[in-house]
Image (tube, helix red, strand yellow):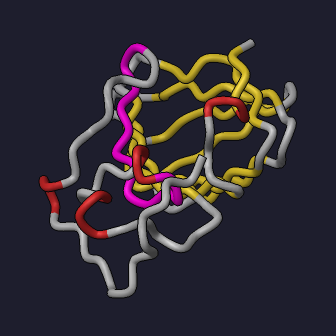
């Protein structure tokens, strides 16, 4: 799937509002995809002008609105989430985990999980997925 663009050979800096959000992932869930080896998934820069990052992973910022949730989903790849704001209950293969600002949650491959926002604040977290997310790696249950 990788396009035949040259690899990025210089450092990249993403400036605040320049990074456009993708269409909503689920109701009340938004994503800004910063780094992905597939240019079509990079929201932080114009890949066709710069090239493609030489990475295996994808890295993005998710926001789940208060009162909303991420539905039960299984990825065939690993995920690491760092909570920037808010708090949530992650349910991973039936185990409930409370996470809040400053916590890191690791979700192994093939683990069904859901995320419910707790309290009166949106949940904002950074996520690294390895290898990089592709639609065929995700199953909504």
Residue depicted at x 55% and y 56%:
58
> Residue 1's x, y, as percent?
60, 46
Regarding residue 91, the answer to whether it shows in the image is yes
Viewed as shown, does residue 84 lie left or right of 104?
A: left
Q: In this view, does 99 lie above or below 103?
A: above
- Quadrant where the image shows the C terminus: top right
The answer to which image quadrant residue 116 occupies is: top right
Regarding residue 61, the answer to whether it shows in the image is no
Residue reaching furthest bottom?
10
The answer to which image quadrant residue 27 occupies is: top left
> Residue 36's x, y, as percent?
49, 57
**Is residue 34 on the magenta stretch?**
yes
Q: Give the range drawn in magenta.
A: 27-38
Viewed as shown, does residue 85 lie left or right of 44?
A: right
The answer to which image quadrant residue 93 occupies is: top right
**Is residue 35 on the magenta stretch?**
yes
Q: In this view, does 78 lie above or below 110?
A: below
Residue depicted at x 61% and y 17%:
71
Callout count:
0
Identify which residue, 5 or 72, lies in the foreground: 5
Residue depicted at x 16% and y 67%:
15
> Residue 33's x, y, as percent?
39, 49
> Residue 102's x, y, as percent?
50, 62
Viewed as shown, does residue 138 lie left or right of 81?
A: right
Viewed as shown, does residue 24 lie left or right of 95?
A: left
Identify which residue, 76 or 94, lies in the foreground: 76
Residue reaching furthest front?
4
Residue depicted at x 33% and y 28%:
120
Q: Is residue 78 above or below residue 94?
A: below
């Amino acid at each position: 799937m990788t396009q035949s663009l040259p690899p990025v050979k210089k450092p990249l800096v993403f400036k605040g509002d320049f990074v456009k959000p993708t269409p909503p992932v689920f109701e009340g869930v938004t994503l800004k995809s910063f780094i992905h080896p597939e240019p079509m998934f990079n929201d932080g820069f114009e890949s066709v002008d710069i090239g493609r990052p030489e990475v295996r992973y994808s890295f993005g910022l998710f926001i789940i609105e208060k009162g909303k949730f991420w539905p039960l989903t299984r990825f065939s790849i690993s995920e690491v989430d760092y909570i920037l704001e808010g708090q949530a209950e992650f349910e991973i293969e039936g185990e409930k985990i409370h996470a809040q600002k400053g916590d890191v949650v690791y979700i192994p491959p093939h683990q069904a999980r859901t995320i419910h926002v707790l309290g009166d604040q949106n949940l904002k977290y950074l996520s690294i997925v390895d290898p990089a997310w592709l639609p065929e790696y995700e199953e909504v249950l």
